Image: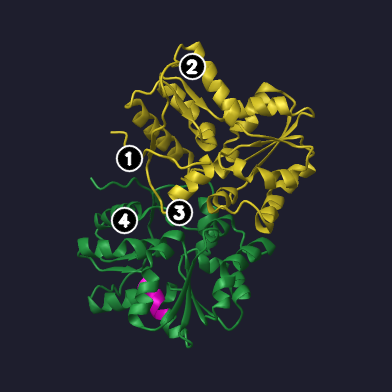
Chain colours: A yellow, B green
Amino acid sequence: MPYGAKSAATIRRYALECALFLLNRDVKMIVAACNTVSAVALPRLKELLRIPLIGVLEPGVEAGLRATHANRIGVIGTQSTISSDAYQNRLRELRPGIDVSARACPLFVPLAEEGRTTGPIVHKIAEAYLKPLKHHSIDALILGCTHYPVLAPVIASVMGENVALVDSAETTAKAVEDVMLREGLLRTYGPSRINCYVTDIPLNFKKLTRRFFGKPVERVEQVELTTD
Amino acid sequence: MPYGAKSAATIRRYALECALFLLNRDVKMIVAACNTVSAVALPRLKELLRIPLIGVLEPGVEAGLRATHANRIGVIGTQSTISSDAYQNRLRELRPGIDVSARACPLFVPLAEEGRTTGPIVHKIAEAYLKPLKHHSIDALILGCTHYPVLAPVIASVMGENVALVDSAETTAKAVEDVMLREGLLRTYGPSRINCYVTDIPLNFKKLTRRFFGKPVERVEQVELTTD
């Protein structure tokens, strides 16, 4: 990471390497829990692989369409996500005539990573990015990047109480359950556990994972990915 | 990129891959023109490779020592550069008793990449990072990251006119010339040309290279690196 400033070709290659790594561990389903990967690489993965695959874009779009009553919606995300037009196209496909405003917010990821989620600096940056969307009178804003929910308070304070913030996390979890039930993949017995595989463990990895997960992440294993 | 938030092991692996790629193209000397690579990976590369290798840390340290008269110096850089203590140790080694203040500025690289180099936002961020250094009464500040010179005006306005900003670019070029002359490697005939090899060409690559080089970069070739 970060994926948001890489080329589409590189994002697709990384996503395929990640998927093949997981397939070698006999997973029954893969969730691409990254908006940039969902927007840029998921269609290609679905062409290539048989396993059920789900991204965070489709659940975010569905939640967004439920949240807008004025049919004026906004989407924020990384440079690559917004430039792919994936959110904009899917929203217009499912609801022709909808008014979509999109904006890349490249500083939001490094702000979240630095833990700078409150105070005048992040407020001023959020204002600079979001003012055009606010002037567009949207009534719902899709947080199209997994880092953005930690900035939700400042985004809400800039957008005001009449704009619903849409986070795809819960809708994605529900969509995963639906697929698991439909395909008969849901395990109903025994305890669950989480194994994390990462391609790098940078200096502040522990602090960051605690910030995003709300608790320490255990069983973290560093691996090297390859398509060989 | 960015390298500044990756682990030391990953930075060393990438640096070795880059160096081997260049050696396969029969270069006569390699400059690691990245402070993070210079601080974290250069000693290991020097152990492994015979070719003349130069980083930007040593020239930056030398220029910094010439610039400070009060023997109170500051260094700013990425998380990985500052955490490596490479600048701090080398400054103290060459001038025992010097007072060194160091500070990581993780938002400076994304700000420079976004082209947000003037205005109240970048000024406020610079103030937040640099105030502790200013209170420490330094009289010279090493810009220990290749991105920071594009932020020099705002850094200067925060630090005030009594603090000299030290950019290692010119000192590094001079050090390269010295090595070339000493080793008899300097070519004195024919036109020069620049070939650029990159591992990715992201969306705004052209705009960014123009911003940093001051003119368009030609002959850019995307390559895949490997140690095989």
Give the Cα distance between marks 3 and 2: 37 Å
Q: Earlier in the sequence, mark 1 or mark 2?
A: 2
Q: Earlier in the sequence, mark 3 or mark 4?
A: 3
Q: Residues within 10 Å of mark 4 (few under 14, many from 20)?
A: many
Left or right side of B144 for A70 = right
Q: Amino acid type of disc 1?
A: Val
* Nearest-to-viewer mark from 3 and 1: 1
Disc 3 with disc 1 on a shared chain: no
Residue A137 pos. (x, y %): 80, 39
Q: Nearer the viewer, residue A158 or B59?
A: A158
Q: Amino acid type of disc 4?
A: Arg
Residue B97, above or below B208: below
Instruction: Name the dominant secondary structure of the magenta segment.
Output: helix
CB of mark 3 within 8 Å of CB of mark 4? no
Residue A44, above or below A217: above
Q: Amino acid type of disc 3?
A: Pro
Give the Cα distance between marks 1 and 2: 27 Å
Question: Where does label 4 land, which residue?
Answer: B12
Q: Please report the bounds of the magenta region as a residue range.
A: B57-63
